[in-house]
Image: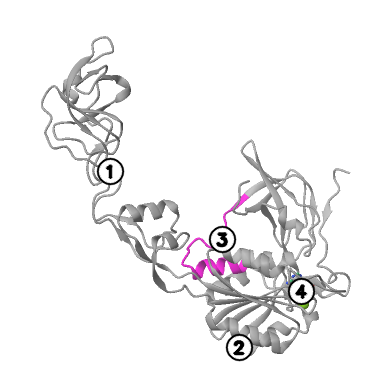
Amino acid sequence: MKNDAKTQETESGRGGPGGRDRNPAGDLLPVEEARRRILALVPILAAVEVPILELRGQVLAEDIRAGEDIPPFDNSAMDGYALSAADVAAATPTHPVALEVVEHLPAGTVSRRTLAAGQAARIMTGAPIPPGADAVVMVETTDGGRERVLVRGGVRPGENLRRRGESVVAGEVALARGTVLRPAEMAMLATLGRTRVRVIRRPQVALLSTGAELVPPDATPGPGQIRDSNRFGLLGQVAELGCVSIDLGLAGDDAAQLRALIDRGLGDADCLITSGGVSVGDFDLTRRVLGEFGPVESWRVAMKPGMPQVFGLARGKVVFGLPGNPVSSMIVFDQFVRPALLKMSGHRQLERPRWPAILDEPIHKPAGKVHFLRAVVENRAGILHARTTGPQGSGILKSLTLANALIILDRDVTRVEAGERVTVELFDRPV
Ligand code: AMP
Ligand code: MG
């Protein structure tokens, strides 16, 4: 039993002898070639100026130079006493040194005097160091009153100080063009006083589902009908990338309806995505109607799931016709639309890192296509282990909901045994 290999199911209803999957492998467009063609056509969008709170995840379109030193003044890293290190050089717990406390400096206040020998200032974290002090002794090594403090240990000059400019020096490029703006970069912009900066615009992505059998998710399907799920999965994927989605809704398998929705979508969107109606059996409705708007091609990509696809330009906008099977649509988005939208958004890292993992179960597959298996990857004692999420049919959404990763098996691979190494891509969620 334990050596029972999982044999990958065929695309629902399309496999088998004489089926359309049986075309010779040479017919199929390699995955890397499809990705290369897509990325070659996709533009990087223009820059816009955006307020700081709206730019998370966007890509900086300008170098940000510091207008001033950060921190702008030497200040205390501790709550304690600012003093001259020389004054307490001899201090020990048994022979403390007494100093006169001449000032109290909470954060936000500035000293009005220069410390003389034998004097200290009570100081809080972040308050500027008074002239005459060159170190701060922390409150824990003192016994203090308001007027006199006993210091029970020495400090080195400079100890417990934060120096002017130690984070960023005036004139330095604090954030380079091309940087992806995460919360840390938002904080850096704020500290530099840059409340608006130029970033690459977020792509607007229009989405529609095709299929006469589909009803909206809040409807009860009649006989032979199912709920439209692809649009919602795809809308989620668009949102995860920080793009703005335009939900065009549902088109049946009706050319006029499809044409009207595509026409509307192409108005505002930078990219239009359809799902369904791209396989040969669907009399190629999506490709035909998209083709009225510009040069588009039907592709048969050497991948599973997700072989049939449409790609091209419609009215100058990038369009993707994704296959209708629920898992296929999301995997094709993940592998092709995601890098395209990242490129549009100005990102340089377009693909997820891939990692080696130990396969915990044997897998057999036919040669000819890259397989993207939905998987659970776990870190066990510093080594990644991968197993599939169960049945991998292209309509089985549960294979995706249970997954935190993809196992990627190359075209020529036909079997991998338990314990052998495979390549995985981790989704953006904790392993
Ligand atoms: P198609 O690519 O249009 O031939 O569809 C392939 C399979 O995916 C069929 O079983 C469809 O019913 C199903 N399908 C197509 N579009 C959707 C959708 N938006 N939501 C859920 N299932 C779909
Ligand atoms: Mg259909």
- Give how far across and how far down residue 138 sits, in percent: 29, 26
Which residue does the numbered mark 3 point to in the structure image?
351
Disc 4 from disc 3: Cα separation:
34 Å
Q: Mark 1 or mark 3: name the one nearer the start of the chain.
A: 1
Q: Nearer the viewer, mark 4 or mark 3?
A: 4
325 inside magenta stretch: no
Q: Mark 1 or mark 2: name the one nearer the start of the chain.
A: 1
User: Which quadrant would the N terminus be assigned to in this image?
Assistant: top right
Q: Nearer the viewer, mark 4 or mark 1?
A: 4
Q: Nearer the viewer, mark 1 or mark 3?
A: 1
Disc 3 residue type (three-letter): Glu
Disc 1 residue type (three-letter): Glu
Q: Secondary structure at mark 3?
A: loop
Q: Is residue 231 left or right of residue 199?
A: right
Disc 1 from disc 3: Cα separation:
35 Å
The answer to whether residue 6 of the structure is visible from this angle is yes
Q: Nearer the viewer, mark 2 or mark 3?
A: 2
| Residue at 77% across, 75% down | 214
Which residue does the numbered mark 1 point to in the structure image?
166
- Disc ID at residue 293: 2
Q: Is residue 78 left or right of residue 347?
A: left
Q: Residues within 10 Å of mark 4 (few under 14, many from 20)?
A: some
Disc 4 residue type (three-letter): Val
Disc 2 residue type (three-letter): Phe
Q: Quadrant of residue 295?
A: bottom right
- Disc ID at residue 215: 4
Q: Quadrant of residue 107?
A: top left
State whether residue 323 is above or below residue 147.
Answer: below
Q: Is residue 38 left or right of residue 1?
A: left
Whether label 2 touches label 3, CB < 8 Å: no
